[in-house]
Amino acid sequence: MIRDFILTFLWSISPLGEAKVGIPYGILNGLNPYMVFVVALTANILVYPIMMFFLDKINVFLFRWYWYKKMALWVAKRAKKGSATSLKKYGNMGVVLFVMLPVPGTGVYAGSIATYLFKLERKAAFFANTIGITISSVIVWSLAYFGSQAM
């Protein structure tokens, strides 16, 4: 049981899934669905401060290597392309809208990168990312929970 909660947390903090994968994993493994929601949401909210630290400190250091710079610029272009319209039009509300979509390519990782690239005010962007991921997590939790009940 503890192992499954740890894996739920790790899936939820991972860029490979975020809470979109962590929540279904926990629910489908028979964990308390309410605890799954709390663990997954907490892990996903922690992504923002970790990403801001990475982008401010470690990213700058790694930029001196060509392979990293090439990869980072590709990710930055992709994040700008996916979020530019909503961020320019709606600001932090655009971050909420972008992060709340429970589809691949959106989420706190992309929201954090967009915050960094568009130089949004960090505290407000943190709350926007938190609201967005909470809405997304409620959607995913509802689908996973009620879907598992129907089985």
Image: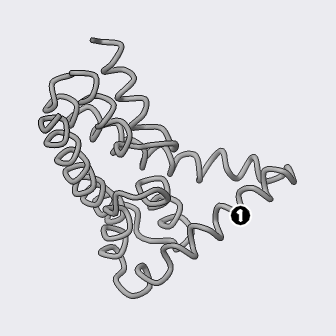
In the rendered view, tell whether residue 112 sits above or below residue 88.
Answer: above
- Residue 14 % position (x, y): 48, 38
Binning the other alpha carbons within 10 Å of mark 1 as few (below 14), some (14 to 19) or many (20 upward) gives: few
Furthest-bottom residue in view? 89
- Residue 114 % position (x, y): 50, 67
**Residue lying at 48% horizontally and 74% vertically, measured from the top left:** 83
- Residue 110 % position (x, y): 49, 59
Number of marks present in the image shown: 1
**Residue lying at 72% horizontally and 64% vertically, measured from the top left:** 73
**Residue lying at 34% horizontally and 73% vertically, measured from the top left:** 92
113 horizontally vs 41: left or right: right
In the rendered view, tell whether residue 92 sits above or below residue 45.
Answer: below
115 horizontally vs 34: left or right: right
59 horizontally vs 70: left or right: left
46 horizontally vs 131: left or right: right
Quadrant position of residue 58: top right
- Residue 44 % position (x, y): 36, 43
Tell me the quarter of the image containing the C terminus.
top left
Furthest-right residue in view? 66
Furthest-front residue in view? 151
Q: Nearer the viewer, residue 6 or 102?
A: 102
Tell me the quarter of the image containing the N terminus.
top left
Residue picked out by circle 1: 74
Quadrant position of residue 120: bottom left
**Residue lying at 36% horizontally and 13% vertically, measured from the top left:** 3
The amino acid at mark 1 is Trp
Label 1 residue SS:
helix
In the rendered view, tell whether residue 38 sits above or below residue 56.
Answer: above
Quadrant position of residue 91: bottom left
